[in-house]
Structure formats: structure tokens, C-alpha cells
Image (cartoon, helix red, strand yellow):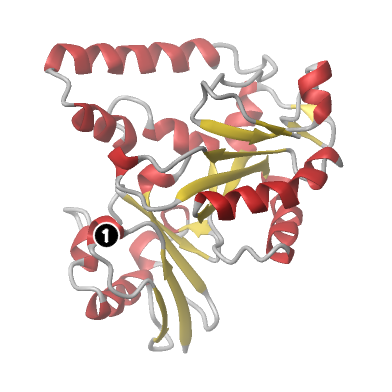
């Protein structure tokens, strides 16, 4: 299934591809998507993951506009056509 | 109307009524929010762009703000270099019960990035231990004593503003 990914304001991570459409397995989670994004942008997964394997508070991972920490964090299931936006936490106003 | 005060980092789009008659736009269907309701329900759609892009969007949103279909908008006057962001950030504020209606307006104006954030999330980031305040302290190179003073000020300011959860929220000067 296809997931559209937009990585905003992540110059600090040296992002190479900021807009991606990724083909994920049907049971993909946020964690799986982050690993797929990392294949296009090495270092992305390390930056997005905190010491206990959760989402780093330094970034905000939105799925269809909703912050994934208010869903099921790394375990949030993705659905075909979902749109993911990732921004640094500092950009939240 | 677009309110551009040179002393502020932010440029605002607020109803003329707010500027002339102190109309409180932090409402749900005309009812002002209490501090508690503000922390629970008030938030914003985030939009990112170059200064000229967010300015153009601000001009397009202005009529919706006057019609009170969009409560208020705020955007960066310039890039914040300390934070290494390469885009200005625009916040389009509303109550979470009306966020889908506001999103439809944004989508019709060409906004693609969909990112909703509650104000409480932003405020938490600017409290001691929050990622933004700690990054700001680090970026300024403050010593331990200065950093502690900044943290204490942030804590005191938050406590003062939200001391009574049933008071009408009156805003934070920026």
C-alpha cells in the first residue's frame, strides 16, 4: 500500500528526499515506515527514535494531521493513502 | 486584518473587531474559553513556507478571519536561524471541534501539509525540561544559574496565566 511522506524543515538532518511515496506492507506501522524512510534518508530512524525505542520528542510525526504520540506511537498502524508529515518539535509555534 | 507590529517576531491575522473592540477570538461558536477549555481544546494547523508564501496565504485567509470562519493566524516575520529551520511557520488557530472546517478552507487554498497541534503541547515544550526551552537555553549558551532563572520564569509565567482554570483565557502577549 502507498503512504505519502513529507519531511518538513528537516535540513538539520541532511534530508535528501523530503517528499516520498513509499510502498509499505499491509500491516505497516509508524516504526516500519520510519525504517523505510531511513533507506532514502540515512540517519532518519536514529534521529526519530528515543532511547527506549519510542518516538523522539525532538520531532513530531503526524499521520493524517494527528500527532502519532496521541495515537499508538511507533505501533500506530498505517492505512493505504495515509499522509505522514514529520517536523522538528521546535517548529510547533 | 493583518497586524504587523515591528517589535514582534510574529505577524498576526485577527478580526478587525479584535483590534478595535478587543473582541476575544478564542471561542467556540462565540463562547469564550476558560483556561481549562483552552488547554484542552485550543490548537492550530501548522503550515510551513517561505516568507512570501506564508504572506500570500495570510492575505487569502484574511477574509475568512473577518468572517470569523478562521479565528486567528500567526506567522514568523523571518526565519529563526537558531533553530536551523529553513521555512517560516504559520499557525492557523481554532478549537478542535472546528478544526475540520478550518482544514477544508486551508485545503481549498492549496495547503497540503496536515499537522494539528494543541496549544498545551506547545506550552509544555516551553516549560522546564521541555524540548524547546532546553534547546533555546542550550542555543543561547546560558550558564547554570542563568538557565535556572529562565526555567523558573517560564514555570512562574505558566502558573500565573493558568492559576484559575475557570477564568476566561485572555491570551499570551507575543
Residue B149 percent coordinates (x, y): 25, 11
Judged left or right of residue B145, residue B115 is right
Q: Is residue B95 above or below residue A27?
A: above
Q: Is residue A54 visible?
A: no
A22 and B112: which is toward the camera: B112
Judged left or right of residue A48, residue A77 is right
A57 and B93: which is toward the camera: B93
Which quarter of the figure has residue B82? top left
Q: Secondary structure at mark 1?
A: helix
Read off the residue under disc 1: A48
Q: Tell me the residue at 61%/25% (across/down).
A: B36
Q: Is residue A26 above or below residue B65?
A: below
Residue B151 percent coordinates (x, y): 29, 18
Judged left or right of residue A18, residue B166 is right
Q: Is residue B150 above or below residue A92?
A: above
Which quarter of the figure has residue A30? bottom left
Q: Tell me the residue at 41%/83% (across/down).
A: A27
Residue B98 percent coordinates (x, y): 74, 48
Q: Is residue B83 visible?
A: yes
Q: For the view shown, which residue lies furthest in the left direction?
A: B143
Q: Categorize mark 1 by other alpha carbons within 10 Å: few (<14), some (14-19), many (20+).
A: many
Which quarter of the figure has residue B137? top left
Q: Is residue B96 above or below residue A81?
A: above
Residue B169 percent coordinates (x, y): 66, 20
Judged left or right of residue B141, residue A61 is right
Q: Tell me the residue at 24%/60% (across/down).
A: A13
B86 and A81: which is toward the camera: B86
Q: Tell me the residue at 28%/73% (across/down).
A: A16
Which chain does the numbered disc 1 sit on? A
Amino acid at each position: 500500500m502507498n503512504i505519502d511522506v513529507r519531511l518538513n524543515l528537516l535540513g538539520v538532518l541532511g534530508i535528501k528526499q523530503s517528499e516520498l511515496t513509499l510502498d509499505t506492507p499491509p500491516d505497516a506501522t509508524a516504526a516500519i515506515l520510519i525504517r523505510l524512510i531511513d533507506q532514502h534518508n540515512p540517519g532518519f530512524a536514529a534521529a526519530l527514535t528515543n532511547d527506549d525505542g519510542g518516538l523522539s520528542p525532538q520531532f513530531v510525526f503526524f499521520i493524517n494531521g494527528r500527532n502519532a504520540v496521541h495515537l499508538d506511537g511507533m505501533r500506530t498502524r498505517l492505512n493505504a493513502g495515509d499522509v505522514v508529515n514529520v517536523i522538528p518539535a521546535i517548529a510547533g509555534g | 486584518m493583518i497586524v504587523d507590529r515591528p517589535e514582534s517576531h510574529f505577524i498576526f491575522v485577527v478580526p478587525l473587531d479584535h483590534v478595535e473592540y478587543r473582541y476575544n477570538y478564542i471561542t467556540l461558536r462565540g463562547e469564550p474559553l476558560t483556561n481549562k477549555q483552552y488547554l484542552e481544546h485550543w490548537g492550530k494547523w501548522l503550515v510551513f513556507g517561505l516568507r512570501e508564501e506564508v504572506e500570500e496565504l495570510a492575505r487569502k485567509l484574511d477574509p475568512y478571519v473577518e468572517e470569523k470562519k478562521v479565528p486567528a493566524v500567526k506567522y514568523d516575520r523571518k526565519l529563526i536561524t537558531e533553530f536551523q529551520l529553513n521555512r517560516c511557520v504559520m499557525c492557523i488557530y481554532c478549537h478542535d471541534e472546528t478544526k475540520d472546517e478550518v482544514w477544508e478552507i486551508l485545503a481549498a487554498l492549496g495547503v497540503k501539509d496536515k499537522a494539528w497541534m494543541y496549544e498545551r503541547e506547545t506550552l509544555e515544550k516551553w516549560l522546564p525540561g521541555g524540548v524547546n526551552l532546553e534547546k533555546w537555553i542550550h542555543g543561547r549558551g546560558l550558564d547554570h544559574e542563568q538557565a535556572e532563572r529562565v526555567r523558573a520564569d517560564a514555570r512562574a509565567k505558566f502558573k500565573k496565566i493558568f492559576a484559575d482554570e475557570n477564568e476566561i483565557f485572555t491570551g499570551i502577549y507575543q
